[in-house]
Amino acid sequence: MQTLNVDLGERSYPIHIGQNLLSRPLLVPFIKGRQVMIVSNETVAPLYLDRLQAQLSAFQVDTVILPDGEAYKDLEHVNRIFDGLLERRHNRTTTLVALGGGVVGDMTGFAAACYQRGVAFIQVPTTLLSQVDSSVGGKTGVNHHLGKNMIGAFHQPQVVLADTDVLATLPERELSAGLAEVIKYGLIHDEAFLSWLELNMPALRRREAGALSYAIYRSCAIKAEMVALDERESGIRALLNLGHTFGHAIETDQGYGQWLHGEAVGAGTMMAADLSARLGWISPSSLERIRRILLAAGLPVLPPAEMSAERFIELMAVDKKVIDGSLRLVLLQNVGQAVVTSDFSQEHLAATLAAGERLGQL
Amino acid sequence: MQTLNVDLGERSYPIHIGQNLLSRPLLVPFIKGRQVMIVSNETVAPLYLDRLQAQLSAFQVDTVILPDGEAYKDLEHVNRIFDGLLERRHNRTTTLVALGGGVVGDMTGFAAACYQRGVAFIQVPTTLLSQVDSSVGGKTGVNHHLGKNMIGAFHQPQVVLADTDVLATLPERELSAGLAEVIKYGLIHDEAFLSWLELNMPALRRREAGALSYAIYRSCAIKAEMVALDERESGIRALLNLGHTFGHAIETDQGYGQWLHGEAVGAGTMMAADLSARLGWISPSSLERIRRILLAAGLPVLPPAEMSAERFIELMAVDKKVIDGSLRLVLLQNVGQAVVTSDFSQEHLAATLAAGERLGQL
């Protein structure tokens, strides 16, 4: 087991990474009261809930089981967590435990941020995506029918358990979706890690524990470094959104849950790389290198064929990164170096958006 | 105009108190972006919305008008604020302005805390209760059908405008409800202020501007002092809840909005005083003094006749101040000195609860 410390002053917390963590009482030191509410979903609970509950026999443990999927990441389903907490009379010393992927983590974290104006929570992410992304940074929240992740809070967990064993049951598509974010860390901040990923992609797709642990550790370390510098996302942290503005537009257009988040980020990353190449910031061979690793990870490199450039523009206009009408995007200055910028022409952007459209129709 | 500074480090903000503040551009220096969303209700908007909007012609100003009443203080109606923000494409530099009483303030503040994980907001409280209570402290939130204020966040405003002129249109019952909180400040922390209130109650009920300004200033100053010492309510700030645990039980039992919050606090304060007297902490004459000033303010001093002791116990068990099964109450050690304690016998508590029951049936 490796442990990474996310350094946020009095809100610092450890991420434990390795095999067979769910069967060890690693959570117990982080539970301050007598009550625990485990929030999971219908897919994950039958697989791992028993194993987790076995560690918590000293506490009043209750559960809320949500339907599985991004389509349910809304206020109505967060309210089910509040129902469970109040019906079982959880007080402000309770600890919420999120057992599931990013959707469960985001909703549970948001419920913890708001229940009685803030209670403790613990993340037990069960997808590669949530292990490398939502484990770090404290972003919690839900979707609104007019925009993704528009309602939320910053709320840090007490501890995160990233158990590589649980990835054994992860569907192929979801593993690839997680790899989209892993690749992103290499692209924005660490060219050497990207090279490592190029070599080890077959091992990762075979789910070899050692390769997975290293990819998770390195991804979380890069994210933790950026979050520590910028907890409330005013500057450098925005680089983590490479591919996300395009990707969110795809998710919104298709309806949450049709494209997996990581798949949308994969295609969105390719669009950001395409625009960076059109601006002359990265070379055609770098663009091809990015396309190859995304394909090697099993990810889409094109947006949905039916999405027009106009539709992208319409959806991106409500992105949280729009400041007073000006769209800011994360683009690549180099492989391994990203930048947040509105320094691109509408013509170049239109060309990127239209290229996706044309290529998708081939 | 008097200005009180609430001292919370980088989250410090001023409260302006006085006459005719709504017609002055006092908000403008606190609006950082170009967008403003005014949230009000169907009662207050026709009276004061125009006056406020006239100060904001330099901005994109949109409005959300909610139905009036505590019955609508829920997630569903907060979602209407999110609908308005997203439909009008407000970005994370927007400022929300709450124009209304405590319900509008709590909901708007909570919406501001959660919209895009936190945007700025300004309070323009239009009831005495909200001017002396929710103006200070940063508590925001909504009710759940199983408990009051169970969902929320701590989120401080940029500035508060407490205009005594708007109290001219306040219904008599609501003025009395506000006075319940004003009396509370004297009882928990400042016996001299309580004496001033005894002398000036007729002037306050006649809505004399000078008396109102002083009562608001002194109330906010006492609350600000306690909040500055304890922003997240772990200790001294809990004293502000004198009468509230009993009061919340009354509100929950009767259905939100049947009893005004301040009326429930009035009866709840009398119950806390009754228990304090049974414990021998305050004298019978102090108890009578408290009863007289509550009556002089036009407040109820008895809970609803139909509420049994058992019903109180049941409802108080979900109060946020229950820690691991033990009920803590704010009681009076003296007039002007409160304490949070679970140091009372179940017999004394039962006697207080049953006394309300018996007296209510006279």
Image (cartoon, coloured by chain):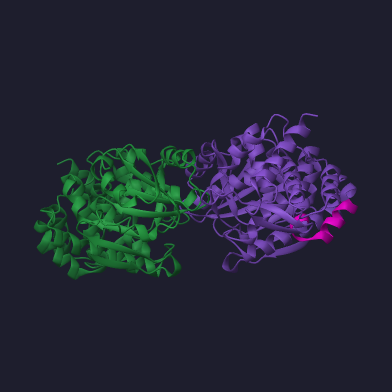
Chain colours: A green, B purple
Residue A262: x and y, percent?
A: 25, 50
Q: Nearer the viewer, residue B9 or B257?
A: B257
Q: Nearer the viewer, residue B311 or B188?
A: B311
- Can residue B190 be found in the magenta stretch? yes
Q: Quadrant of residue A6?
A: bottom left
Q: Main secondary structure of the magenta part?
A: helix
Tally of numbered tags:
0
> Which quadrant is the C terminus of chain B positioned in?
top right
Instruction: Give the magenta part as a residue range.
Output: B187-200
> Which quadrant is the N terminus of chain B positioned in?
bottom right
Residue B42: x and y, percent?
A: 66, 35
Q: Is residue A56 visible?
A: yes
Q: Is residue A317 visible?
A: no
- Can residue A231 be found in the magenta stretch? no
In the rendered view, does B84 fall on the left or right side of B130? Answer: left
Residue A346: x and y, percent?
A: 34, 54
Q: Is residue A352 above or below residue A7?
A: above
Residue in view at x 9 percent, y 57 percent: A202
Q: Is residue A199 above or below residue B64?
A: below
Residue in view at x 64 percent, y 45 percent: B346
Residue in view at x 46 percent, y 40 percent: A88
Q: Nearer the viewer, residue A357 or A75?
A: A75
Residue A282: x and y, percent?
A: 21, 65
